[in-house]
Image: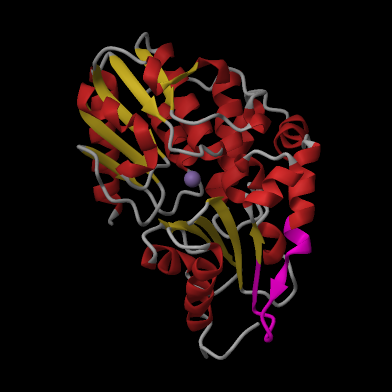
Amino acid sequence: MTSEQQASERAAALDCLRRGQRFALMLHVRPDGDSIGSSLALGLALRRLGKTAVLVRADDLPANLLFLPGIEEFVHYSEVGGEFDAAVFLDCGDLDRIGPAKILVERARRLVNIDHHPSNQRFGDVNVIEPRAAAAGEVAHALIRELGVSLDFPIACALYVALITDTGSFRYENTSAATHEIAAELLRAGVKPAEVARAVWEDRSLSSLRLLQAALAALEVSGDGRLAWTTLTREDFQRAGAHSLESEGIVNYPRTLRGVEIAALFLEEAPGEVKVSLRSNRRVDVSLIASHFGGGGHARAAGCTIRAPLAEARELVLARAREALGGGRAAG
Ligand SMILES: [Mn+2]
């Protein structure tokens, strides 16, 4: 995509946001910091322009993000009435990612799709897809500036959370000079990085640490050391007393093992339903592995859900991962 195409996409989205009066901002299922932060920021910005912006969720919000100013504005989709000039999707690669909230789509005149996933399905009437952005929050930031809304504290906090969650606090490959420039602006708007980092990363429940303990106990590494994975069963969740959202970030532990290129977390969501999170360090595009199983994501972070017993799903993915590593030799 050329920068002219990108500029015209942005212009079309801005036109839609300026003309409309009533918007629904749609979180994806299992919403993360980018989904919540970018949607909250743009929603608050639209309100500042005197518009109605309904912030819509289908799932519970992660406990570590409840500190965000304005977070209480999210409404469960089943309680949302009326029609919308546009439904706005941020950080949402395909329409199915919004889960049951999809029923609201019929009540929206237009769909505005704002994202940074290269695998985005371009399901909107307007699509602003910027794969070079580290987070959807970066794209939201650009749109908010172009709408002429200044960054107040709640908007800045929301955007900052979007940036740090999708870049692992500016550690991942997607972090760019632009990411840091935006972060600097957010700090000038009052964001306290240490306070946000503490709330987001270091205010953990005992159950989430118990779950991590189970995941580390189940860690496995291939013979050549390039593939590491772990598994969390239903029993692990029950024993830890953990909610399924508390597995967030666990896949990064096998990824940090020296020599590892691909890391995977196999999470038994329900009997016969396995959620797979994939990470890579330098070379392998794990979004290709995920999309083979009907999922998607980024080169270094992707995921999919497989309907199969846990052991079977794990073997399918590990075989694919070994192939991606080249060699296809037996690991384990
Ligand atoms: Mn994102």
Q: Quadrant of residue 255?
A: bottom right
Task: Please indicate whether residue 4 sits to the left or right of residue 196 in the image.
Answer: left
The image position of residue 122, as x and y in percent, is 26, 47
> Is 241 inside the magenta-drawn segment?
no
Q: At 73% across and 37% down in the image, what residue appears?
A: 197
Magenta residues, start to end: 215-229
Please identify the residue farthest to the top as the structure is shown: 50
Q: Quadrant of residue 136?
A: top left
Towards the viewer: 48 or 58: 58
Query: In this view of the protein, can residue 27 be seen by the observer?
Result: yes
Towards the viewer: 185 or 127: 127
- Quadrant (top left/top right/bottom left/bottom right) for the C terminus: bottom right
216 to 240, vertically: above or below? below
Q: Quadrant of residue 7?
A: top left
Q: At 23% across and 34% down in the image, what residue appears?
A: 12
- Quadrant (top left/top right/bottom left/bottom right) for the N terminus: bottom left
Q: At 29% across and 47% down in the image, what residue appears?
A: 6
> Is 224 inside the magenta-drawn segment?
yes
